[in-house]
């Protein structure tokens, strides 16, 4: 029996200890926010928070979680009461197809939980592992900056003076 605490709720799952966390979340707990993308830890669609770190849930066996708490997008907010980060993603229209967004939000939330006002370098380093095929990275970064109270980076004009 595997014991997991997900979004503050304790679960006892009768699953193989080598089962990836992603499958336990989706198949056993019916939490479908984390998506299967590549299965190789290269896209970030499956990103959740374990302990205080963003992890690729497709690569993490449930036996490796131990007593650490698991947070998924379902544990951040609701449709009626989104978290500040979710609200910012909505306001700035940071999603296009939406497939990557739960993973993006969870990776950003892990950073903001540890460092509420990260530097631009910290923000970009944290978000780099997650991919968006639709190309909304600019709006995703803007949504995170808004919550973190970071200024937008200076834009190069391209014109020489």
Image: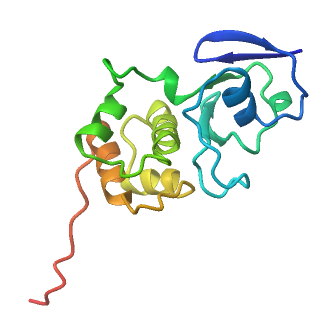
Q: Is residue 73 left or right of residue 137?
A: right
Pick whichever, 26 or 120, lies toward us. Answer: 26
Q: In screen coordinates, is 47 left or right of 141? A: right
Query: How far across and down, in percent of the image, does residue 153 sit?
Result: 25, 60
- Residue at image point 59% right, 50% down: 44
Q: How many marks?
A: 0
Q: In terms of image quadrants, where is residue 61?
A: top right
Residue furthest left as drawn: 161
- Is 90 positioned to the left or the right of 124 in the image? left
Quarter of the image with the C terminus is: bottom left
On the image, the x and y values in percent for residue 90 come to: 29, 38
The N terminus lies in which quarter of the figure? Answer: top right
Q: Is residue 71 left or right of residue 63?
A: left
For the rendered model, the colour scheme is rainbow
Quarter holding residue 144: top left
Q: Is residue 146 above or below residue 66?
A: below
Foreground: 34 or 113? Answer: 34
The residue shown at (49%, 39%) is: 102
Picture residue at 49% right of the left edge, 47% below the top: 99
- Residue 91: give x, y in percent of width and height: 23, 39
Residue with the most extreme bottom position: 160
Q: Nearer the viewer, residue 100 or 147?
A: 100
Q: In the rendered view, would you say 5 is above or below 84? A: above
Residue 116 occupies which quadrant of the picture?
Answer: top left
Q: Is residue 151 above or below residue 49?
A: below
Residue visible at 60% across and 56% down in the picture: 43
Residue 135: horizontal and vertical position, in percent? 39, 63
């Amino acid at each position: 029996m595997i014991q997991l605490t997900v979004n503050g709720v304790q679960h006892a799952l009768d699953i193989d200890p080598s089962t990836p966390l992603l499958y336990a979340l989706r198949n056993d707990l019916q939490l479908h926010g984390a998506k299967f993308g590549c299965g190789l830890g290269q896209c970030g669609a499956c990103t959740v928070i374990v302990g205080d770190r963003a992890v690729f849930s497709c690569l993490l066996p449930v036996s490796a979680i131990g007593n650490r708490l698991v947070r998924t997008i379902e544990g951040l907010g609701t449709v009626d009461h989104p978290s500040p980060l979710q609200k910012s993603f909505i306001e700035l229209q940071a999603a296009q197809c939406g497939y990557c967004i739960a993973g993006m939000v969870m990776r950003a939330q892990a950073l903001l939980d540890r460092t509420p006002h990260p530097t631009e370098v910290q923000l970009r380093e944290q978000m780099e592992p997650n991919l968006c095929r639709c190309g909304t990275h600019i709006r995703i970064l803007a949504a995170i900056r808004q919550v973190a109270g970071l200024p937008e980076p200076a834009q190069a004009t391209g014109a020489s003076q």
